[in-house]
Every structure is written in structure tokens, then in C-alpha cells.
Image (spheres, rainbow, N blue to C red):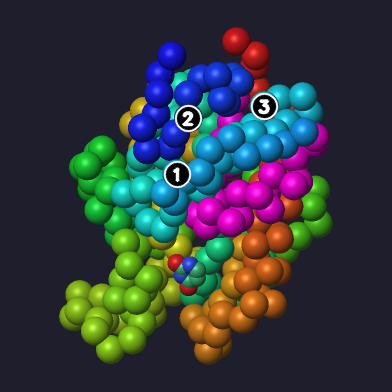
Amino acid sequence: MTYLYHLDLDENKIKGAKIALLPGDPFRSEIIAENLDKNYGEIAWKREYCSYLGDIKGVKIVVISTGIGGPSTSIAIDELSRIGVQTFIRVGTTGSIQEFINIGDVIITSGSVRLDGASTHYAPIEYPAIAHHEVLYSLIEGAKRANLRFHVGITASTDTFYPGQERESHVLRRFQGMTDEFKRLNVLNYEMESSTLLVVCSVLKLKGGCVTGVINSRTSGDKISEENLKIGETNAIKTAIKGTEIFIDSFYKIL
Ligand code: URA
């Protein structure tokens, strides 16, 4: 038996689950679990890591929050991989940086700009942060099946919400003008975990992907309201659940 110190999990608790859905917010774990097929339940809650276990199409799924940012995300993936989890789908929220993206749209990350530090502890900065093709395909089909407006492309993944995403007064020179530059470079959005997730998964031979729901727009005011948060969260969850169903149908093998 392998006891995971940070997550308070072991093989018995996750009952052979090989797929993990990863929100950032611990209170979002239960909301995601409510969308699983049946008999879901909380299996652990330590620090930022709130874990539920349930089923999709008869396949065990673990839902576990990562907390905000790369360091805690890397711990969640690294530890879960030691007890047999192989596929990791981040289910998060995001701020758009392109005018054509609306609140509530879903963004499926094909690759991330690595503005985090944690991923550099796993691979040099030249190494790409890219989604696994099977997870990417599944999330795209999931968004279509959920009938949602979605975009597939590059995400800027930062270690900080404020200076790293060019907010407030204390923005270092190297970050000034970055949002406009990313816009010109066809980057779609800002969030804070995908680059760590995608690099750690590639390095550890795991399958990683990321879907986020848009809750604010950097091109029109940057306001985050309760209502927008709910719309973004709900649409990301719908895509992740449908996407996981497609992943199970198309790629999942019981070993
Ligand atoms: N999450 C982020 O990291 N940035 C945003 O603007 C919204 C959500």
C-alpha cells in the first residue's frame, strides 16, 4: 500500500481509479462529483486537496482539487501517479484575452506558455507544455456534445494572478504590455495551473488535458461576478464530464 502524505489517499481509497478530474477550488470537487453517475462520496480532505470518488460509465473517477497554482498541482499529479492514476483533466476557470471570446465560453488548451516555476523543476523551459492528443480530442468532442461555444488553442499559465497577469500597480517591467503581446500572438486566455499539469504529465508519461470556463474578459473590464463565475464553472464541468465519457469510449483500456 502506498500512502500519499499530502493527499491523504492510498490505493484502497481510490479503488483502481485511473482518471482524475482536477478543479482548483476544493469546494468545486463536490460540485463535479454531483455530475458523476452514482454513489459518489468524499474520500479525503487534507489542506487544499479535497477528494471525491465516483463513476462514469462504470469506470472509477477520482475528483481532487489542486489548490491554486503550480506547486500544489505538481504534488497532486506526482502523488496520484504513484497509486496508478494515468489521466489528468484540469477543470478550471479562466480570463479571456481575445475579443471574440465570450463569458461562459469554454477554452480547451492545446498548449501553454510556461510562466510558472513548478514545471521548470520537471523539464527545462524549452520543453513544450502540450495536451495529450487523446485528452484534447475527447474534450473537443465533449464540448461539441454539450452544445457549448468553445475555442481550442494556447493558454498563458502564470504563477501569480496579479502581476503575472498584468493586474494592479506592481507589475514588473518584464510583464508590462504582456497581455497585448499575447493577444497579438493568438494566446486565448490566462489561468494558473495548465503549464505545470501538462509538463508534469508529459514527463511522467501520463495523459494530461485542460478545460476552463471563461469568467472574465481582459478586453472588456475584467469584472468577475458571482453569475459569471457560475456560468464558466458549469460549462467547464459539462465539457469535462462529456469529454471523460468520450475518453472512456474511445481510449480507456481496463488493464
Ligand atoms: N483565473 C485566472 O488565472 N485569471 C483570470 O483572469 C480568471 C481566472
Disc 1 packing (10 Å; few <14; some 14–19; many ≥20): few
Front position among marks 2 and 3? 2
- The amino acid type, in three-letter code, at marker 3 is Lys
Of the residues under marks 2 and 3, which one precedes in the sequence? 2
Query: Which numbered dot is residue 9?
Result: 2
Query: Which residue is at 28% across, 42% downward?
Result: 127
- What residue occupies the far left of the structure in this picture? 173
Query: Which residue is at 69% across, 77% downward?
Result: 227
What span is colored magenta in the figure?
17-38
Residue 147 in view in this figure: yes
Q: Secondary structure at mark 3?
A: strand
The quadrant where residue 4 appears: top left
Q: Which residue is mark 3?
A: 60
Q: Position of residue 95 (x, y in %)?
A: 51, 71
Disc 2 packing (10 Å; few <14; some 14–19; many ≥20): many
Q: Which residue is mark 1?
A: 46
Q: CA distance from mark 2 to mark 1?
A: 10 Å
- What residue occupies the far top of the structure in this picture? 255
Query: Which residue is at 65% across, 56% downward?
Result: 236
Of the residues under marks 1 and 3, which one precedes in the sequence? 1
- The amino acid type, in three-letter code, at marker 2 is Leu
Q: CA distance from mark 2 to mark 3?
A: 15 Å
Q: CA distance from mark 1 to mark 3?
A: 21 Å
- The amino acid type, in three-letter code, at marker 1 is Lys
Q: Secondary structure at mark 2?
A: loop
Q: Relative to the observer, which residue lies in front, 197 or 21?
A: 21
Vertical relation: 134 (above or below) 166: above
Vertical relation: 229 (above or below) 144: below
Q: Position of residue 26 (x, y in %)?
A: 53, 53
Q: Name the quadrant of the C terminus.
A: top right
Disc 3 packing (10 Å; few <14; some 14–19; many ≥20): many
Q: Is residue 254 left or right of residue 93?
A: right
